[in-house]
Image (cartoon, grey):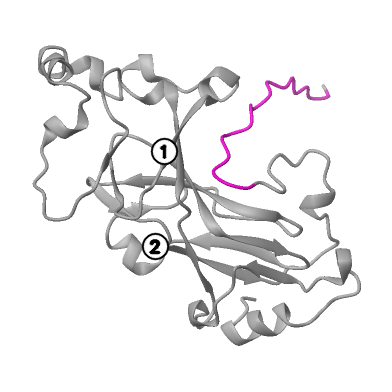
Amino acid sequence: MQLTGPEILRRMQTYNKNNPGYKPDIVITPFDEKCLGSNSYDLHLGDLLKVYKHTIPVGMRPIIEYHGGRKYSMRDWFKSYNDYLNYHKNPELFDIRNPQYLLDPCDAQSHETVDIKIPTNGVILSPLIGYLGHTVEYTETYNLFPYIDGKSSVGRNFILNHHTAGRGDDGFCGQWTLEIRVLHPTVVYPNMRIGQIYYEQFVGERKPYNENASSHYNGQMGPTPAAVIPIESITQKQR
């Protein structure tokens, strides 16, 4: 059962003695009631992006700083004219399907990142690169199931703000990391509305995320790279 906008606000204003520090079931900081919708709350894009260093072709820029009114071309993606010529001579070196740009979820070196600060005038994102962003909002959720998704205007600009990881947990505290992809070269700005958070009630005994020793991302602030996925040995009992 999904909470309505007025119920989200009521839960934010009602302190719960069973929560840490008697906090309400929903904490959103900063909060602006104008961002409260029929059954969600609008989230905004923070001013820092991270890109996995290993996925950026040599000589290419992961973003282009945007200046409205200027005309752009493929040349703008390259750090120098020689890099641009090399792209034409050796296109396979700039093809993200090339295995030299592979990500290994079980290898920490795959998760080394470069930081990109988004200026107020915005940056152009590339369809070839995945970006880790974050919400301006810090949230805490207790006794509810939170999840995020894109706003319709974001989706209609073909901006994807998460890859299967839009579901949160009861007890999660932190900013939300966004896994951003675009279909076309697309401008994003700091503090633009990037998605919505929803809340649902659940059934069953609680297992809060902030009390789970195996939780990787509780308390995260800013775009947080992937934790290394361990290679586990799973055995089955033989009949």
Q: Quadrant of residue 3?
A: bottom right
Residue 103 is a magenta residue: no
The residue that appears at 16% across and 18% down in the rendered structure is 87
| The N terminus, quarter of image | bottom right
**Which of the two residues, 17 or 233, is positioned nearer the viewer here?**
17
Residue 227 is a magenta residue: yes
Q: Which amino acid does label 1 sit on?
A: Ile
**Which of the two residues, 210 or 28, is positioned nearer the viewer here?**
28
Query: Chief secondary structure of the magenta span?
Result: loop
| The magenta segment | 221-237
Q: Is mark 1 on a helix, strand or loop?
A: strand
**Which of the two residues, 12 or 182, is positioned nearer the viewer here?**
12
Instruction: Say whether residue 139 is left or right of residue 87.
Output: right
Vertical placement of 163 versus 45: above or below?
above
Point out residue 105 in the picture as x, y percentages from the top left corner. Answer: 56, 25
Graded by Cα atoms within 10 Å as few (under 14), some (14 to 19) or many (20 or more), the crowding at tag 2 reads some
Vertical placement of 109 versus 167: above or below?
above
Point out residue 115 in the picture as x, y percentages from the top left corner. Answer: 46, 35
Vertical placement of 163 versus 106: above or below?
below
Q: What residue type is labelled 2?
A: Met
The residue that appears at 63% across and 27% down in the rendered structure is 228
**Which of the two residues, 88 or 85, is positioned nearer the viewer here?**
85
Query: Would you name the residue on which mark 1 appears?
Result: 116
Query: Would you name the residue on which mark 2 appears?
Result: 192
